[in-house]
């Protein structure tokens, strides 16, 4: 195995210069940097990162707390986190902690033993106030979800406005009887989407109907979306449009409509939320609220890196833009 001294000899520079290049120092000239990198490739040199990180009291790793990998919503966010982490010379490790009564113990162990240099939370509900004691004591970022009562860094979208805009679009298409498929998972995003839905109805003087609000499973499953939609569509006076808080629930609603012989979008409009990649494989193509998932993950990692290096210069809440994407599953009421 090649040594740093052999790299220096082949590149005709000092060992200190090789070390500065490996550490990303801007003090080395481009010419010398190129010579060192060329020598590293020729010798297939691999620096001892473990030893280097121990000297710095760094792990060069971050933890990402995630509820479940079965939900494809998290894939693009994780890609943004891990891809950016690699560019910054960090490893990202996923920790599934949903419903784990030992999650605080795991977090405390991570902090005390420096198992990671920072943490990104992709989930938390409004009951997780136990996190308050760790805010400000260890670099952490909340991504996609946050605890409203905590003053902690967060990256995501404006879920209230996104839901409001989607329902407003349905109203502009002539729909006055609009149902909603949501759940009761305790996430702030779920609450805010419900509030946006209700506000859009109120601002347009439309009647809020309790029977038009149906709750699916907390894991946003396709099957629960199908069952929830059937409850709405078999009412004596069913809605002409359904707004769902996730794409998986919306695809379930489309399936229910198909089973019941309801034409999309002539008799029913359906909107989802997220714009997951796989929705393009289903027909009719789903109208949805598009979240910039990759950018959310990327921004969260960049902000965490700033916190870890003591250079934080971002707002407490970073809100990225959402987009409404109308496809084949929605249209003007009555097809006019």
Image (cartoon, rainbow, N blue to C red):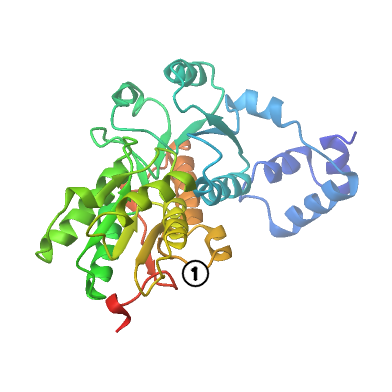
Q: Secondary structure at mark 1?
A: loop
Q: Nearer the viewer, residue 156 or 291?
A: 291
Q: Is residue 300 above or below residue 29?
A: above
Q: Viewed as shown, does residue 4 lie left or right of 184?
A: right
Q: Viewed as shown, does residue 44 lie left or right of 117?
A: right
* Residue 158 shows in the view: no
Q: Quadrant of residue 121?
A: top left
Q: At which x and y percent is residue 236?
A: 23, 57
Q: Is residue 107 above or below residue 239?
A: above
**Residue at the image point whose x is 55% and y is 48% from the top:** 75
Q: Nearer the viewer, residue 326 or 192?
A: 326
Q: Viewed as shown, does residue 194 lie left or right of 283?
A: left
For mark 1, what is the residue?
284
Q: Nearer the viewer, residue 332 or 72?
A: 332
Q: At which x and y percent is residue 45?
A: 84, 40
Q: Is residue 149 above or below residue 205?
A: above
**Residue at the image point whose x is 72% and y is 39% from the top:** 19
Q: At which x and y percent is residue 61?
A: 59, 33
Q: At which x and y percent is residue 107?
A: 46, 21
Q: Nearer the viewer, residue 185 or 153?
A: 185
**Residue at the image point whose x is 45% and y is 20% from the top:** 103
Q: Quadrant of residue 144?
A: top left
Q: Quadrant of residue 319?
A: bottom left
């Amino acid at each position: 195995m090649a040594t740093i001294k052999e790299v220096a000899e082949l590149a005709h520079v000092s060992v200190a210069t090789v070390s500065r290049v490996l550490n990303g120092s801007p003090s080395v000239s481009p010419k010398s940097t190129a010579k060192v990198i060329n020598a590293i490739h020729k010798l297939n040199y691999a620096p001892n990162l473990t030893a280097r990180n121990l000297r710095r009291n760094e792990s060069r790793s971050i933890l990402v707390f995630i509820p479940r990998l079965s939900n494809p919503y998290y894939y693009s966010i994780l890609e943004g986190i891990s891809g950016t982490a690699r560019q910054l010379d960090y490893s990202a490790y996923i920790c599934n902690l949903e419903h784990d009564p030992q999650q605080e113990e795991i977090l405390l162990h991570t902090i005390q033993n420096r198992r990671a240099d920072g943490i990104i939370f992709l989930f938390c509900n409004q009951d997780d106030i136990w996190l308050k004691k760790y805010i400000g004591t260890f670099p952490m970022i909340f991504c996609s979800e946050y605890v409203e009562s905590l003053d902690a860094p967060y990256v995501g979208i404006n879920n209230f406005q996104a839901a409001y805009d989607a329902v407003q679009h349905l109203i502009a298409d002539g729909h006055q009887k609009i149902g909603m498929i949501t759940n009761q998972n305790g996430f702030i995003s779920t609450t805010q989407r419900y509030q946006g839905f209700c506000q859009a109805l109120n601002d347009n003087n439309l009647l809020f109907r309790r029977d038009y609000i149906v709750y699916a499973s907390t894991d946003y499953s396709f099957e629960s979306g199908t069952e929830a939609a059937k409850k709405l569509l078999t009412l004596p006076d069913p809605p002409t449009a359904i707004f769902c808080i996730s794409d998986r629930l919306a695809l379930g609603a489309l399936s229910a409509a198909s089973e019941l012989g309801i034409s999309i979008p002539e008799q029913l409009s359906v909107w989802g939320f997220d714009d997951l990649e796989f929705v393009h494989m289903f027909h009719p193509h789903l109208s949805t609220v598009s979240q910039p998932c990759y950018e959310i993950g990327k921004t969260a990692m960049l902000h965490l890196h700033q916190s870890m290096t003591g250079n934080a210069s971002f707002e407490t809440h970073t809100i990225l833009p959402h987009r409404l994407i109308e496809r084949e599953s929605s249209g003007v009421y009555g097809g006019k």
